[in-house]
Image (cartoon, grey):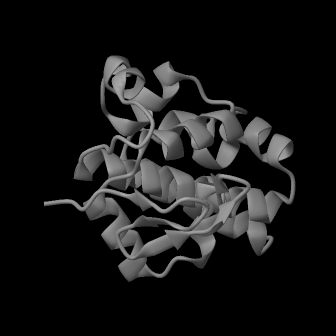
């Protein structure tokens, strides 16, 4: 059974083994913690469930709407909208959310600009068969392919 996140007044928020530090009653941004997580921490987070608040942060940061997110995460739009605050998603959905967040964090670090990366995600790309990267992210294989392309861009091999 998944353990619920616990928040101590003006203290850390705990989600499984990961501790998000409170800062003026806000925790450290979810997306900012992804690159520093090791595999074990990511697996624990997936098993415990990613919260709606974490998904909202991804949504706001990436500029993706609920229709696009529901396609990427393979769940209904209503499922995404009906969760509230610290409510957790199930394991398969949490895994896809984390894969998406990991790809977004990686892409943003390579492009060094959130808006430029978000624009790239929505633009057609010859390396992806003239499809936009976001169009491939409805499968785990597609997410991996986008991440591989970001890696090629990082090393100048595209």
User: Image height check: is 14 above or below 59?
Assistant: below
What is the count of numbered marks?
A: 0
Quadrant of the image containing the C terminus: bottom right
- Image side of residue 151 versus residue 144, left or right: right
Q: Where is residue 24 in the image (x, y as percent from the top left)?
A: 73, 55
Point 69% across, 68% down: residue:
152
Quadrant of the image containing the N terminus: bottom left
Point 77% across, 47% down: residue:
117
Point 69% across, 31% down: residue:
63
- Image side of residue 152 versus residue 54, left or right: right
Q: Position of residue 143 (x, y in %)?
A: 47, 52
In front here: 99 or 30? 30
Q: In which quarter of the image is residue 10?
A: bottom right
In front here: 131 or 83? 83
User: Image height check: is 51 above or below 43?
Assistant: above
Q: Quadrant of residue 132?
A: top right
In front here: 117 or 81? 81
Q: Residue furthest front?
A: 9
- Image side of residue 80 versus residue 134, left or right: left
User: Image height check: is 155 above or below 100?
Assistant: below
Q: Where is residue 105 in the image (x, y as percent from the top left)?
A: 65, 59
Point 55% across, 68% down: residue:
12
User: Image height check: is 53 above or below 7?
Assistant: above
- Image side of residue 141 versus residue 32, left or right: left
Q: Position of residue 67 (x, y in %)?
A: 48, 19
């Amino acid at each position: 059974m998944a353990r619920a996140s616990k928040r101590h007044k003006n203290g850390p928020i705990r989600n499984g083994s990961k501790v998000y530090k409170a800062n003026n009653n806000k925790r450290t941004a979810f997306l900012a913690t992804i690159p520093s997580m090791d595999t074990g921490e990511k697996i624990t987070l997936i098993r415990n469930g990613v919260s709606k608040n974490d998904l909202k942060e991804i949504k706001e940061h990436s500029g993706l709407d609920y229709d696009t997110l529901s396609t990427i995460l393979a769940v209904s739009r209503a499922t995404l909208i009906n969760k509230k605050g610290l409510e957790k998603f199930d394991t398969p959905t949490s895994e896809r959310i984390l894969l998406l967040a990991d790809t977004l964090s990686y892409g943003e670090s390579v492009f060094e600009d959130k808006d430029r990366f978000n624009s790239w995600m929505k633009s057609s790309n010859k390396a992806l068969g003239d499809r936009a990267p976001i169009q491939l992210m409805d499968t785990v294989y597609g997410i991996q392919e986008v991440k591989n392309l970001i890696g090629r861009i990082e090393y100048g091999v595209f």
